[in-house]
Image (cartoon, rainbow, N blue to C red):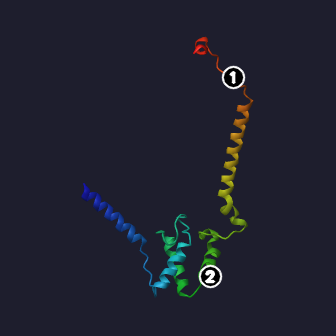
Amino acid sequence: MTRVLFAFALALAAAAANAAVDPLPFKDRAEEVRFQNLTKQLRCLVCQNESLNDSSAPLAADLRRDVFEQVRAGKSDDEIKAWLTARYSDFVLYDPPLRGGTFLLWFGPLLVLGAGAAAVVVSVRRRARNAALLPATRPASTDAEEDW
């Protein structure tokens, strides 16, 4: 049974490694590092939760090839990002610039957190006010308890 599980795990690992391999002919290690850093800053348009560097989607592979060709053509990282945002909007960037269209993207979670905190404060104050308005009642005691 363990041999079957081991063979299955090995097959899964090989399939994952094969899907992630995208051999590109880098001229040196510096170009490869630049390419890796750039593709980590760009979002896969299919997966949406993975960078171009991590995604195994066919569109991500195409975009990696496009980025590689532009790196080889001598374009700067900013020029490559501008080209991608012109085609796919700011969504392709993991760190989009602060603009009117991205205001909710940047501050939406903070606004939701603030609204939740305000709701908790209002609820706690309302309960405290209602508790203060109730008359303080003591339970009736029996004669046996008073003699104690």
Q: Position of 80 compared to 10: left or right? A: right
Q: Position of 136 compared to 60: left or right? A: right
- Could you tell me how many numbered marks the image carries? 2
Residue 141 spot, x, y in % from top left: 63, 16
Q: Residue furthest front?
A: 148
Identify residue for label 2: 79
Q: Which of 83 and 110 lies nearest the eye of the viewer?
A: 110
Q: Position of 84 compared to 126: left or right? A: left
Residue 112 spot, x, y in % from top left: 67, 53
Compared to residue 68, the image places residue 119 above or below, namely: above
Tell me the number on the disc at residue 7. Answer: none
The residue that appears at 52% across and 86% down in the rendered structure is 72
The residue that appears at 66% across and 63% down in the rendered structure is 106
Task: Point out the frontmost of discs 1 and 2.
Answer: 1
**Which quadrant of the figure has residue 76?**
bottom right
Q: CA distance from mark 1 to mark 2?
A: 75 Å
Tell me the number on the disc at residue 137. Answer: 1
Q: Which of 125 and 41 lies nearest the eye of the viewer?
A: 125
Q: Quadrant of the N terminus?
A: bottom left
Q: Which of 116 and 50 lies nearest the eye of the viewer?
A: 116
**Which quadrant of the figure has residue 8?**
bottom left
Residue 137 spot, x, y in % from top left: 69, 23
Q: Position of 86 compared to 44: left or right? A: right
The residue that appears at 52% across and 66% down in the rendered structure is 50
Secondary structure, mark 2, is helix
Which residue type carries mark 2? Glu
Q: Residues within 10 Å of mark 2 (few under 14, many from 20)?
A: few
Q: Which of 24 and 58 lies nearest the eye of the viewer?
A: 24
